[in-house]
Image (cartoon, coloured by chain):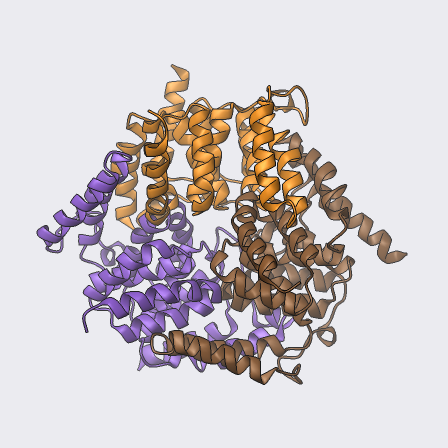
Chain colours: A brown, B orange, C purple
Amino acid sequence: MKLLAVTLFSFCLLAGDVAAASDVQGANLMLKPEDIRAVAPALESYAQKVLKDDLWKRPGLSVRDRSIVTVAALIARNQTVELPTHLGLALDSGVKPSEISEIITHLAFYTGWANAMGAIPAARDAFRSRNIGADQLPPASGPQLPLDEAAEKQRASRVGEQFGQITPSLVQYTTDVLFRDLWLRPALAPRDRSLVTVSALIATGQVAQITYHLNRAMDNGLTREEAGEVLGHLAFYAGWPNAFSAAPIVKDVIEKRPH
Amino acid sequence: MKLLAVTLFSFCLLAGDVAAASDVQGANLMLKPEDIRAVAPALESYAQKVLKDDLWKRPGLSVRDRSIVTVAALIARNQTVELPTHLGLALDSGVKPSEISEIITHLAFYTGWANAMGAIPAARDAFRSRNIGADQLPPASGPQLPLDEAAEKQRASRVGEQFGQITPSLVQYTTDVLFRDLWLRPALAPRDRSLVTVSALIATGQVAQITYHLNRAMDNGLTREEAGEVLGHLAFYAGWPNAFSAAPIVKDVIEKRPH
Amino acid sequence: MKLLAVTLFSFCLLAGDVAAASDVQGANLMLKPEDIRAVAPALESYAQKVLKDDLWKRPGLSVRDRSIVTVAALIARNQTVELPTHLGLALDSGVKPSEISEIITHLAFYTGWANAMGAIPAARDAFRSRNIGADQLPPASGPQLPLDEAAEKQRASRVGEQFGQITPSLVQYTTDVLFRDLWLRPALAPRDRSLVTVSALIATGQVAQITYHLNRAMDNGLTREEAGEVLGHLAFYAGWPNAFSAAPIVKDVIEKRPH
């Protein structure tokens, strides 16, 4: 009940897109509903009628997943202004602090180190204001999820043949740091890790990498319906062109998978 | 005469690329000519000789249109630092407050919600400093421009066939929110709305979406010469690579249209 | 010896990714190691073990070059938060103030005017804190490097035939401002200017422009091994997807060049 109340409150915040105060990176940053109204009354209206009352209530993708998709898009696009609102909404929607921590760590590799660094202040403030301490965060290292050795060897061998001569460092780090380390960290389920990855790819127009990662996401449990809803959701948070540039690839992936 | 004086003054600002003070999102942000000189004297010189004295004075694209293109590029690329200067220049060049309001609303959908939110503080400050009140802004909703039902049905049917099964939400919102609502808002002429859209696409490297929207822009009245000047203008404000990646597509669109 | 000490100190800074204070654009911005630890302990660990102790120590690309690549990526991606750290590291690694000045000027054209403007505050502060004055900066104009007239005429003629009718302004500025001016400025060696350009292209996913500029870079002296290391380095600073989207093109360029 308390969660519900907090969630509803956050939806109100969302509607007005009020960014929380932060003491770094935009000191005393506050975007108030009256600021939006003073520039574009239509935006406030769309936020309420289309985003809050419709998009976020659509079936096919849970509010928790929509929060993960939105946070991933904002970090991938380096849009820290909206991050406090959506980190709060994510925590209210059932995304665990440890999962937010892992999402940021994951995106350091999948969108760039500085994107993760840019997300630190907002996450630190969100955790601090909810008394979320180090005990709720994933350790720097520890037990790993089991690895499908055969599949990973096949992947590594394929990439090695393609690029091993050209860029040995990229090939080596991809194996050692990403697929034999980052992806095996247990604090974010592989399906959610894939959801973060695919969202970041679509949100930044990285169409060439969607095929591999959407297949991986669906292997990890993302459904066709969810994939379609991710596109519709990201149209709002990463712009229509990114959604439409990804759509043919999403279609192709889904149609080629065994039913 | 007063407009001219203000415009010339703004060109001086432009030359030095002095960002106006803003009390959020970069509190007391001030980039002064001496800051540029303290890092790269050549940049100050290029700003004067190439941008101010040449690019902005070229025929083929009006100063008003160049302002619209520049503002669209900055919002699309989330570059709020330069926005105060160019919003001021846009207002001085004849872009109406209601048009700026609509440009921001339009780009919420065509570049991402957070891009529009990021533009709010600079626009709010620009409006406030000129005593531009709510009476000069477009209402959240109201009378719409007439719709070409046949053309819209054809578009919706084509997109529905392509993606309706895969992502029903994207298809539905595209029809209901974009083409039967946003594009019919009267405070921004369809030709200008198209100019904003095409500028945002080029400025963010969304080459796959240029063909449709440049054709639409030219249907809406953008000339061949203007399209070519948009490319040259955006080379400076979105970088040479974006201009050159768009150039073959612009060429293809122009050559395939009936003369 | 003093340089070495400063460099080692900077590596420590790098490990914690501590951004220097800046009095504009993020007033009093300070990202401390404990901030990272309070959100994602794994990130601090990766920064130390993978970035500091491994990536930056790899042979095949000098620390100076890695600094140039990193600074170019940050400016190209408009990620000013990390810029103070990496500008300091660049200066400590042997990148001259005049070279940093030229890198920023170069990227105004190759990534967008506002990207260069966004880099000014951090560079101004870095120069000021080291007492780097105007006498150490390249003049706005002066003697130029020699031009290969035949090659430039061929380039200009090829681009003119392709796009001269469509966008005369883009074609003209490319010749006059870029290839007969910017590229001939002597304060940044052509090989380094190419390294900056290629890094910016990869870091922003501008795959269509890599072929021309990587060939130019290798004509200017960049080795195959260095090109491969740039990819591995940028995976961390611009995200894995950008590195993997560029890899096939880098491979194609390298394989097609005469051995």
Image quadrant where one finds the C terminus of chain B: top left
Instruction: Indicate left or right for C144 with B26 as reference.
Output: left
Residue B46 figure quarter: top left
Instruction: Indicate left or right for B205 with A71 as reference.
Output: left
Farthest-out residue, right: A1
**Above/below status of B77 relative to B129:** below
Farthest-out residue, top: B1
Determine the residue positioned at 64% across, 58% down: A122
Whole-percent x, y for residue B122 in the image: 54, 37
Q: Nearer the viewer, residue B152 or B13?
A: B152
Q: Visible in this render: residue B185?
A: no
Whole-percent x, y for residue C173 in the image: 24, 40
Whole-percent x, y for residue A66 in the image: 70, 54
Q: Nearer the viewer, residue A58 or B159?
A: B159
Residue A54 figure quarter: top right
**Above/below status of B247 relative to C215:** above
Instruction: Indicate left or right for B187 with C56 as reference.
Output: right
Please count the marks in the image.
0
Q: Visible in this render: residue A111?
A: yes
Farthest-out residue, front: A259
Determine the residue positioned at 43% across, 34% down: B214
Whole-percent x, y for residue C122 in the image: 42, 56
**Above/below status of C2 relative to C29:** below
**Above/below status of C114 relative to C55:** above
Q: Nearer the viewer, residue A14 or C135?
A: A14
Image quadrant where one finds the N terminus of chain B: top left
Determine the residue positioned at 47% across, 39% down: B83
Determine the residue positioned at 9% across, 51% down: C150
Residue B119 figure quarter: top right
